[in-house]
Image (cartoon, grey):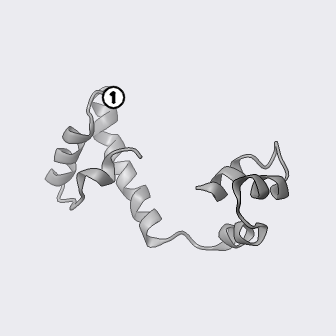
């Protein structure tokens, strides 16, 4: 999350300053840039697409309980805490 923030704010601040303020190493940031996405983050992206469909189709009125029911109807095995925004 911190590395993504750094990437989003490169035009405003230098990498060195962002890393210092966020308490991460520059080498860690540069390693993150070339590291392939984890299986969990790929699964999160796929799941996010499935969550957005019923939420948008409902006019953004569906909350997590209804979205969870829709996901389970699709055969997704996901817990309620996984779909609630953190």
Q: Residues within 10 Å of mark 1 (few under 14, many from 20)?
A: few
Determine the secondary structure under disc 1: loop
Q: Nearer the viewer, residue 9 or 76?
A: 9
The residue that mark 1 highlights is 60
Q: Position of residue 12 (x, y in %)?
A: 82, 42
* Lateral position of residue 44 relative to residue 51, left or right: right
* Lateral position of residue 84 relative to residue 41, left or right: left
Q: Residue at x 71, y 66 (%)?
A: 29
User: Which quadrant of the structure image shows residue 66?
Assistant: top left
Q: Position of residue 53 (x, y in %)?
A: 32, 41
User: Which quadrant of the structure image shows residue 26?
Assistant: bottom right
Q: Residue at x 26, y 40 (%)?
A: 64
Q: Position of residue 23 (x, y in %)?
A: 71, 59
Q: Residue at x 76, y 58 (%)?
A: 19
* Lateral position of residue 18 relative to residue 86, left or right: right
* Lateral position of residue 42 relative to residue 77, left or right: right
How many marks on residues? 1
Q: Residue at x 32, y 54 (%)?
A: 82
Q: Nearer the viewer, residue 47 or 84?
A: 84
Q: Position of residue 17 (x, y in %)?
A: 83, 53
């Amino acid at each position: 999350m911190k590395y993504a923030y750094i990437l989003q704010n490169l035009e405003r601040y230098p990498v060195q300053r962002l890393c210092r303020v966020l308490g991460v190493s520059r080498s860690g940031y540069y390693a993150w840039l070339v590291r392939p996405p984890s299986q969990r983050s790929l699964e999160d992206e796929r799941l996010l697409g499935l969550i957005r469909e019923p939420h948008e189709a409902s006019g953004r009125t569906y909350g997590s309980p209804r979205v969870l029911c829709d996901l389970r109807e699709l055969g997704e095995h996901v817990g309620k805490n996984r779909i609630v925004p953190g």
